[in-house]
Amino acid sequence: MNTFDLKSVITDLESDSTEAQVLAIEAATEIVNNLVEKALETFQRSPDRLFIAERLANFGVAIVAPLEKLTNDSNNLEVIILASLVLLQLGSKVGVRKLLDAFLESDDYACLIARHMVKANIDGFGDNIVTRLRLCEIEQDKFIVCLLEELKKLNYDLPSDLYSRFSDSHVSADIQYVVRNFNKN
């Protein structure tokens, strides 16, 4: 890793010399790439990866390719999920298949995955929410409410079996409220 004097890079960017400006842009690019590399190292080793992941999108397009590589190369499910969510925010769908698998097979970040997938308007995701709702234990009321709210955002019709199940009197008031208001705008 090269070390750069940031002040001199800024000075060269502000100069009238095209040659100095070009060299400064190359130096600035290298600085950003080094910062991305360090940020991803921090992300992978942090005990609180979510807090780091929430800020990775601030690097914009500079972090897309390294995150795509990390998503494909990592064996750590949390790293894969969070990196894929950041990629989705940045418009890359490289991790969508892994997010779908994680959503259907794990409770880790499932509600967060649902929110991002709905926001990104991933085709067919409503069917995945329905599948997941059918697998939920009725005691998972906060999770069920989250999934119902995301399904509603998709203007997806709540299947009759789920409507009946979640309208039952033994279901939490929160779930019943969302179901009652499901088809209202």
Image (cartoon, grey):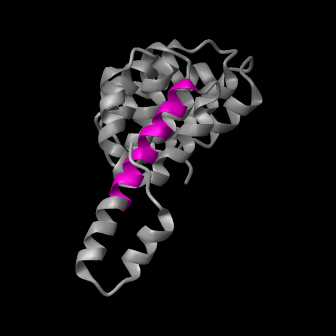
The residue range painted magenta reads 28-45
- Residue 169 location, x and y as percent? 73, 21
Picture quarter with the C terminus = bottom right
- Residue 122 location, x and y as percent? 33, 40
Instruction: Return the residue found at the far left.
Output: 19
- Residue 15 part of the magenta-drawn span: no
- From the viewer's perspective, tell me whether residue 156 is left or right of residue 169: left
Nearer to us in this view, 109 or 155:
109
Nearer to us in this view, 35 or 111:
35
Where residue 111 sits, quadrant-wise, is top right
Task: Tell me, yes or no, if residue 158 can be seen here.
Answer: no
- Residue 28 location, x and y as percent? 37, 61
Name the residue at 63% across, 32% down: 145
Q: In the figure, 94 relative to 132: above or below?
A: below
Q: In the figure, 83 relative to 2: above or below?
A: above
Nearer to us in this view, 109 or 32:
32
Picture quarter with the N terminus = top left
Name the residue at 55% across, 26% down: 109
- From the viewer's perspective, tell me whether residue 125 is left or right of residue 164: left
- Residue 132 location, x and y as percent? 47, 20
Name the residue at 29% across, 41% down: 65
